[in-house]
């Protein structure tokens, strides 16, 4: 689903609307041009490259006269510091390797990069996976901040608590099939957990095993 939404894989059927208009993405660039940015689990970062270089990777602004144009490092360092400070992360040296940041900070760099380059819709693939409590809190707070600023967020996760903290609608998928879409006001967190865990199947198995589950 992520690859279809982000233009990597073309859908075999159905309609895809962005701001009420049908779209047909032929490539990830088409999706980006429509304002849809995807942050994958691997973050698409190069650990040994600087924070700034990762922030502007593929979109490097240049200055000077052709053929002597070069990467405007000073400007990009300033932008990187400013964008990260907006979310409460103090980057003292934007030239430090991005791999020296915590997992939560790297997630925030990836999200901030997408926002800075004009994303209207963010697709986040398991952004809190394998993060500690403090780092997870950092990422969830930033997701909430992004939503408050008017961006749409598709948050893909197996963690019900994380989803319930920041989402207002939930769509549950099981083996490629949609089990349902629910507004937050219409479903409690334990009900959501039960659906995600396969409530009917677990209940049947529990009865077969004498209530040991």
Image: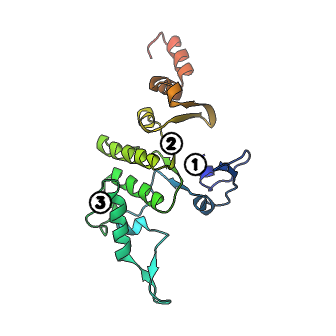
**176 on left or right of 57:** right
**11 on left or right of 87:** right
Q: Are marks 1 and 3 in contact (CB under 8 Å)?
A: no
Q: Is residue 34 visible?
A: yes
Q: Position of residue 206 (x, y in %)?
A: 50, 15
**Residue visible at 35% across and 50% down?**
104
**Residue visible at 52% across and 57% down?**
119
Name the residue beneath numbered marker 2: 156
**Residue visible at 31% across and 67% down?**
94
Nearer-N-terminus badge (3/2)? 3
Q: Is residue 48 visible?
A: no
Query: In this orientation, which residue lies closer to the viewer: 201 or 131?
Result: 131
Question: Does 204 appear above or below 155?
Answer: above
- Residue 2: mark in rendering: 1
- Residue 100: mark in rendering: 3
Structural crowding at the residue carrying mark 3, measured as other residues with C-alpha within 10 Å and reported as few (<14), some (14–19) or many (≥20):
few
Which quadrant of the figure contains the C terminus?
top left
For marks 3 and 2, give the CA distance: 26 Å
Nearer-N-terminus badge (1/3)? 1
| Callout in the foreground (3, 2) | 2
């Amino acid at each position: 689903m992520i690859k279809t939404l982000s233009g990597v894989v073309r859908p075999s059927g159905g309609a895809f609307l962005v701001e009420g208009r049908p779209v047909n993405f032929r490539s990830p660039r088409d999706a980006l041009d429509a304002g849809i940015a995807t942050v994958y689990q691997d973050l698409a970062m190069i650990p040994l490259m600087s924070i700034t270089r990762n922030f502007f990777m593929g979109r490097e602004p240049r200055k000077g006269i052709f053929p002597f144009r070069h990467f405007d490092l000073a400007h990009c360092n300033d932008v990187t510091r400013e964008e990260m400070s907006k979310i409460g992360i103090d980057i003292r040296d934007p030239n430090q390797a991005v791999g020296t940041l915590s997992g939560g900070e790297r997630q925030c760099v990836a999200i901030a990069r997408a926002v800075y380059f004009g994303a209207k819709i963010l697709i986040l693939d398991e952004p809190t996976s394998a993060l500690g409590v403090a780092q997870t809190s950092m990422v969830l707070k930033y997701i909430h901040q992004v939503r408050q600023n008017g961006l749409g967020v598709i948050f893909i996760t197996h963690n019900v608590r994380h989803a319930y903290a920041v989402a207002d609608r939930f769509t549950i998928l099981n083996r490629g099939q949609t089990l349902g879409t629910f507004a937050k006001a219409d479903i409690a967190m334990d009900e959501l957990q039960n659906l995600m865990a396969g409530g009917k199947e677990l209940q049947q198995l529990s009865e077969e095993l004498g209530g040991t589950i």
